[in-house]
Each structure stands twice: as C-alpha cells, then as structure tokens.
Amino acid sequence: DLFHAHIVKPHGGAEGLQMLFHAKEYPTDFPADLGYCQRSSTVRMGPGFRTRNAVYSPMAATRPFRILPPGPAPAYTVDESSLGTRLLDIYFLSGQAYVQGFGRYAEAPQAVMVLQELFGVPPTTPPPRCGMASCW
C-alpha cells in the first residue's frame, strides 16, 4: 500500500533533501469518495492508520528514517509543505519508479537516475533513453 513519496527541500536551511512517504492510501472505508483508486483498494483504516507518514532524511546525523506524528483526522496525512518546499513526487507502481515534478515526467530507469542525482549517489550506468518527448 506504499506507493508514493514527496521529495522536499527542508525549511530553515537544513542540508540535503527529505522524502515524505504516505502509506495506506485510498482506504475503502474513508468517509469521502476518493475516486477510482479508492474503489479498487484493499486498504482499510485501522489502528495503524495514524502512523502512515514517514520521512527519510539521508543527511540526518541520527535517525534518518522516522515515523511522523499524525496529521489532522480523518486522513492523518502530513502535508509535504509542512516539511519544506516540494520538489518532486515519486511513484512506485507495478515494480517501476516514476518521477514527476518541475512540469516533467520520467519513467524508470530515468526516475532512478533523477533520485541518484538528487541524493548525491553516482549512477552506475547511463540509463537508456525513454523515448518520451517529455522525459528528463
């Protein structure tokens, strides 16, 4: 049920970037219609729903991965703007990674290259061209 994250530049001049993950998206028993994804979902709200927000901060000296306090009910979603300026969104669907941001869209393996660049990890091999006009 974890399929997307928001990449943000933290407020206050903190170094590096952060990834905010939202788990348990589109629960079937959410008190509002969330559209198509909700209708085909197997996720349900439950006791663990309040811990659905996690942040990864690779530059953190301690605890680079942590669960955040819940956002407002009923979704308990922490908005990415509360952590910093949103740069990109990344989606993990059917074993593939997709990056969207700055008016662009990239499929794997270009999405992986973008993340490696953002987090300072050198790519191991150059990715093949994706063939999309709007690709990175």
Image (cartoon, helix red, strand yellow):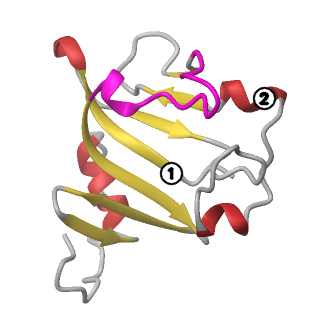
Q: Quadrant of residue 87?
A: top left
Judge whether 136 appears above or below 131 on screen: above
Q: Which of 16 and 27 lies nearest the eye of the viewer?
A: 27
Q: Which mark is residue 48?
A: 2
**Identity of the amino acid at label 2?**
Gly
Dot 2, how many residues are within 10 Å of its Cα: few (below 14), some (14-19), or many (20+)? Answer: few
- The CA distance from mark 2 to mark 1 is 18 Å
Picture coordinates of residue 34, whole percent (x, y): 59, 56
Which residue is pictured at 29% across the width and 83% down the height?
A: 130
Q: Which mark is residue 4?
A: 1
Picture coordinates of residue 79, whole percent (x, y): 41, 31
Q: Secondary structure at mark 2?
A: helix
The answer to whether residue 89 shows anywhere in this view is yes
**Identity of the amino acid at label 1?**
His
Tell me which segment is drawn in magenta: 69-84
Which residue is pictured at 83% across the width and 34% down the height?
A: 46
The residue most toward the bottom is 131
Judge whether 45 appears above or below 89 on screen: above
